[in-house]
């Protein structure tokens, strides 16, 4: 590991800024409960090189993905367990993630890891890491989920966990659905459903054919299912509720719906405007609080992609495994019921409501669907297998439940719950 010196400082260790940023992100998630996206904003400040920023994200992502197993290794090499919030434990987590998941050379791991510590903890960290490397330790084939996640997901945990081994590949949604297979061939990807193309991780998105012409946008395969379940618009009116950053709005517009995209976040709506401009698609954009908004005319369909704990995105956001608990679930379920109430009130008789959440929690999915049917004049419109990508099946209730362990041989997909009704 190269070192340089300046007149007024000690040695500068190459790669240390990226590790400092990773440590700050890990601390923000574990101690302050921030999302990785929130943590990145301040943690990566001053880390300008794209490669260093990507490395910091990769280190902390793998650390969070395998945290339970990394902690077990650390505890196996200490006489007394380090406190959960001890800096030495956090640094060791990062060091082991690099050595065991990112295949970083040992000397680089030691130089940058010890550079994050001072005094006694440095000697301790060096001793623990060296002892584990001498034992030639390894991680299990599948990440061990935290106890509270195991308690919530119960029997499902064993089939979900294998889908969390790697970050997801890149999914694209085609503006012209019939082009998917042809574009998959030219882009070096595969198509797993009409209108879908999957590319390998690390693909430089903005350099891919069709980006500048707006032929596609990035959207997980599971998320692409929701707008497809509303079918062709044929000029009918649709409301995309909580729309930003807008993948579902784009899909609805491409399917011929006259879309109103509503969201409370101006920053996220700006992303939607950019994507509409790039793709040449059209939608009415409304910045408003959905709980106080009043439509000026009825909609033929409402797609409610409700705010949720987003535990279904654990492949790309492994922080959700460690910061989401009963409090967060309780808060989102209350908000979801308020939004379902609004959507059901706005919908005219004969209108379609599609409810979707990227959550693996039954409280946010199955329980909400049952509550909606008990509370409002909504008739279930069962989702059918022929509406879904090959390999997926609806539940016996006619709902859809996906999770990261599904389609594992093809690279998996996010966890979603979806239900569809018509108002009677």
Image (tube, rainbow, N blue to C red):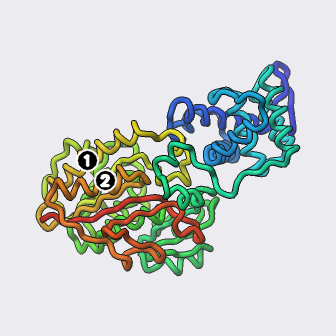
* Label 2 crowd (10 A; few <14 / some 14-19 / many >=20): few
Residue at the spot x=38%, y=59% of the render? Answer: 417
Q: Secondary structure at mark 2?
A: helix
Q: What residue is disc 2 on?
A: 367
Q: Position of residue 396 (x, y in %)?
A: 34, 70
**Image side of residue 122 versus residue 395, left or right:** right
Give the label on residue 387, or none: none
Residue at the spot x=35%, y=40% of the render? Answer: 330
* Label 1 crowd (10 A; few <14 / some 14-19 / many >=20): some
Measured Cα–Cα span from mark 2 to mark 1: 10 Å
Q: Earlier in the sequence, mark 2 or mark 1?
A: 1
**Depth check, front residue: 118 or 15:** 118
**Image side of residue 359 versus residue 43, left or right:** left
Splitting the image into 4 quarters, where does residue 289 fall?
top left
**Depth check, front residue: 423 or 112:** 423
Q: Position of residue 350 (x, y in %)?
A: 14, 68
As drawn, 347 above or below 127: below
**Depth check, front residue: 17 or 310:** 310
Q: What residue is disc 1 on?
A: 337
Asked if the residues shown at circle 2 and circle 1 are in contact, with their CB atoms under 8 angstroms apart, the answer is no
Residue at the spot x=29%, y=47% of the render? Answer: 336
As drawn, 69 above or below 84: below
Q: Position of residue 259 (x, y in %)?
A: 27, 61
């Amino acid at each position: 590991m190269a070192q340089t010196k300046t007149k007024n400082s000690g040695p500068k260790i190459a790669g240390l800024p990226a590790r400092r940023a990773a440590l700050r992100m890990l601390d923000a998630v574990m101690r302050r409960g921030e999302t990785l996206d929130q943590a990145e904003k301040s943690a990566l400040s001053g880390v300008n090189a794209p490669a260093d920023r990507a490395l910091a994200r990769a280190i902390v992502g793998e650390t969070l993905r395998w945290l339970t197993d990394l902690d077990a290794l650390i505890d196996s090499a200490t006489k007394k367990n380090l406190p959960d919030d001890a800096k030495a434990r956090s640094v060791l987590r990062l060091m082991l993630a690099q050595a065991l998941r990112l295949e970083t050379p040992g000397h680089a791991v030691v130089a940058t890891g010890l550079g994050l510590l001072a005094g006694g903890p440095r000697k301790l960290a060096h001793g623990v890491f060296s002892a584990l490397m001498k034992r030639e330790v390894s991680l299990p084939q599948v990440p061990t989920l935290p106890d509270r996640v195991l308690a919530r997901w119960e029997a499902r945990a064993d089939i979900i966990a294998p889908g969390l081994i790697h970050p997801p590949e890149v999914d694209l949604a085609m503006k012209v659905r019939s082009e998917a297979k042809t574009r998959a061939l030219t882009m070096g990807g595969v198509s797993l459903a009409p209108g879908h193309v999957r590319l390998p991780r690390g693909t430089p998105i903005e350099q891919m054919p069709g980006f500048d012409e707006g032929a596609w946008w990035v959207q997980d395969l599971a998320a692409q299912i929701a707008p497809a379940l509303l079918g062709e618009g044929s000029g009918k009116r649709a409301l995309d509720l909580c729309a930003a950053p807008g993948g579902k709005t784009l899909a609805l517009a491409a399917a011929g719906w006259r879309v109103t995209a509503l969201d409370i976040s101006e920053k996220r709506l700006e992303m939607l405007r950019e994507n509409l401009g790039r793709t040449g698609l059209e939608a009415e954009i409304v910045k408003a609080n959905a709980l106080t908004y009043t439509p000026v005319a009825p909609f033929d369909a409402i797609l409610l992609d409700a705010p949720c704990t987003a535990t279904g995105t654990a492949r790309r956001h492994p922080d959700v495994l460690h910061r989401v608990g009963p409090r967060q679930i309780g808060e989102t379920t209350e908000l979801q019921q308020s939004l379902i109430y609004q959507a059901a009130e706005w919908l005219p008789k004969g209108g379609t409501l599609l409810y979707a959440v990227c959550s693996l929690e039954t409280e946010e999915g199955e329980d909400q669907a049952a509550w909606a049917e008990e509370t409002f004049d909504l008739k279930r419109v069962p989702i059918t297998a022929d509406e879904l990508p090959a390999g997926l099946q609806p539940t016996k209730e006619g709902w859809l439940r996906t999770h990261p362990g599904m389609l594992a041989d093809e690279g998996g997909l996010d966890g979603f719950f979806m239900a569809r009704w018509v108002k009677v």
